[in-house]
Image: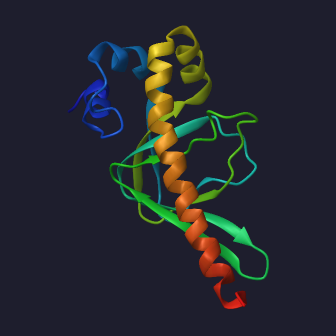
């Protein structure tokens, strides 16, 4: 059975971080599982973790009045789920639902924020990686909004 640290090191988000940095942040993580169809996060709930997806797929969704739930993005193996743990007020801004059984590593947000405060270089490296995730989510949301309002363009 693989060691927890090796699971982190193999994930694309962490792959090129120095081993000592991985050891430093690994204590913030734990393995979790979600059955297909179950919610992983709900908009407005406290965002106290992010998830390193190891297996399975999950839908990131937002509610649109008159249209219901809209899928913004689908994440799966190799992806990171959640960035709201990083930015106050630390609340989820999307709903997330497991589409398949999901196995992931839950990284404790408070623990990581404390570690980033203690080691600014690690914090900078994580912030750079999350900035890329935020950019992709923003682009996906923009595309969804274009689809939502495309029939209303004059």
Residue sticking out furthest to the top: 118
Q: Quadrant of residue 89?
A: top right
Q: Is residue 81 visible?
A: no
- In the picture, the quarter occupied by the C terminus is bottom right
Percent coordinates x, y for residue 88 in the rendering: 73, 33
Residue closer to the observer: 22 or 148? 148
Residue at screen point 68% across, 47% down: 92
Residue 21 sits above or below residue 87 on the image: above
How was the colour assigned to the protein in this rendering?
A: rainbow
Residue at screen point 64% across, 34% down: 48
Residue closer to the observer: 65 or 140? 140
Residue at screen point 37% across, 58% down: 56
Residue closer to the observer: 37 or 24? 24
Percent coordinates x, y for residue 124 in the rendering: 48, 23
Q: Is residue 80 visible?
A: yes
Residue 110 sits above or below residue 98 on the image: above
Residue at screen point 44% across, 18% down: 122
Percent coordinates x, y for residue 81 in the rendering: 50, 47
Q: Quadrant of residue 9?
A: top left
Residue sticking out furthest to the right: 65
Residue sticking out furthest to the left: 1
- In the picture, the quarter occupied by the N terminus is top left
Image mark count: 0
Percent coordinates x, y for residue 49 in the rendering: 57, 36
Q: Quadrant of residue 38?
A: bottom right
Residue 52 sits above or below residue 150 on the image: above
Residue closer to the observer: 23 or 14? 14
Left or right relative to 85: residue 10:
left
């Amino acid at each position: 059975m693989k060691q927890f640290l090796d699971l982190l090191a193999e994930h694309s988000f962490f792959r090129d971080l120095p081993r000592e940095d991985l050891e430093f942040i690994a204590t913030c993580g734990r393995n979790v599982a979600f059955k297909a169809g179950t919610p992983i996060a709900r908009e407005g709930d406290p965002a106290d973790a992010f998830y390193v997806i190891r297996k399975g797929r999950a839908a990131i969704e937002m509610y649109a009045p008159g249209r219901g739930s809209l899928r913004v993005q689908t994440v799966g193996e190799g992806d990171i789920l959640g960035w709201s743990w990083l930015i106050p007020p630390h609340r989820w801004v999307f709903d997330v639902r497991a589409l398949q059984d999901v196995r992931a590593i839950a990284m404790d947000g408070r623990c990581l924020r404390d570690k980033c405060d203690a080691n600014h270089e690690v914090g900078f490296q994580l912030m750079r990686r999350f900035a890329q995730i935020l950019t992709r989510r923003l682009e996906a949301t923009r595309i969804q909004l274009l689809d939502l309002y495309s029939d209303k363009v004059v």
